[in-house]
Image (cartoon, grey):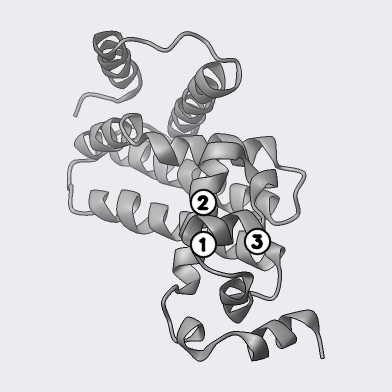
Amino acid sequence: MTDSAQIKQDTPRHERSGRLSADDWAQAALDLIAEQGVAAVAVEPLARRLGVTKGSFYWHFPSRDALLVAALERWEKVEQEMVFGKLEAIPDASQRLRSLFDMVAHEFKSHIIYSELLKALDHPAVQPVIGRVSERRMDYLTASFRQAGLNRNDAQHRARLAYAAYVGFLQLNLQLHQTRLQHDEFEAYVEHVMATLIPVS
């Protein structure tokens, strides 16, 4: 019998009955990634954080890597639903881009997770997720810039410039630890980026 199977067998029925779901564990792993990075994701500290035994973990996942994959898939899914999903109702492409830029500028935790994932691109579970997310973001930006009136080449260039500005700003603030802008300075910066990159409809 494997260790995980033994743990399942030894886990009390009330603990197996659904106090914590796989999504609970995945979200806890994302929280830990935001705080300490991908390398910090481990079963024991997460179990302590959640107030359960390791048996609860092994009821849902066979390994730490399986949890990491689930956490990254959850992060990817939430972005699709919460970010892109909210924007679908905005018919005007320029306004949709403004809403996207504004939403991204004020959703801090997701950016911390993304920054930490960029530091861990050599991990086999991280690279494909970052690849899919980055491609989806670029495709969305390119399509939006085209809908806002730019030709194909200009839309691709503008999308690349916008995404580079996003990643570069994260690196300045979260990896190079540049002094963070004060609230008014940051809002002025975001407005400047939007005025510079988004065509007037």
Q: Residue 148 appears at what percent x and percent y?
A: 28, 35
Q: Is residue 72 visible?
A: no
Q: CA distance from mark 1 to mark 2?
A: 6 Å
Taking the image as shown, residue 26 lies to the left or right of residue 10, namely left
Is there a contact, CB below 8 Å, between mark 1 and mark 2? yes
The residue identified by callout 3 is: 43
Element at badge 1?
Answer: helix
Indicate the amino acid at tag 3: Val
Give the label on residue 30, or none.
2
Q: Amino acid at mark 2?
A: Leu
Residues at marks 1 and 3 touching, judged by CB atoms closer than 8 Å = no
Nearest-to-viewer mark from 2 and 3: 3
Q: Closer to the N terminus: mark 2 or mark 3?
A: 2
Residue 119 higher or lower than 13, as above or below = above
Quadrant occupied by the N terminus? bottom right
Q: Residues within 10 Å of mark 2 (few under 14, many from 20)?
A: many
Checking the image for residue 26, the label placed there is: 1
Would residue 197 appear left or right of 183 to someone viewing this image? right
| Labels 2 and 3 touching (C-beta < 8 A) | no
Q: Quadrant of residue 199?
A: top left
Count residues near mark 1 (Cα–Cα under 10 Å), then give few for <14, some for 14-19, many for 20+: many
- At label 1, the amino acid type is Ala
Observer-side mark, 1 or 3, equals 3
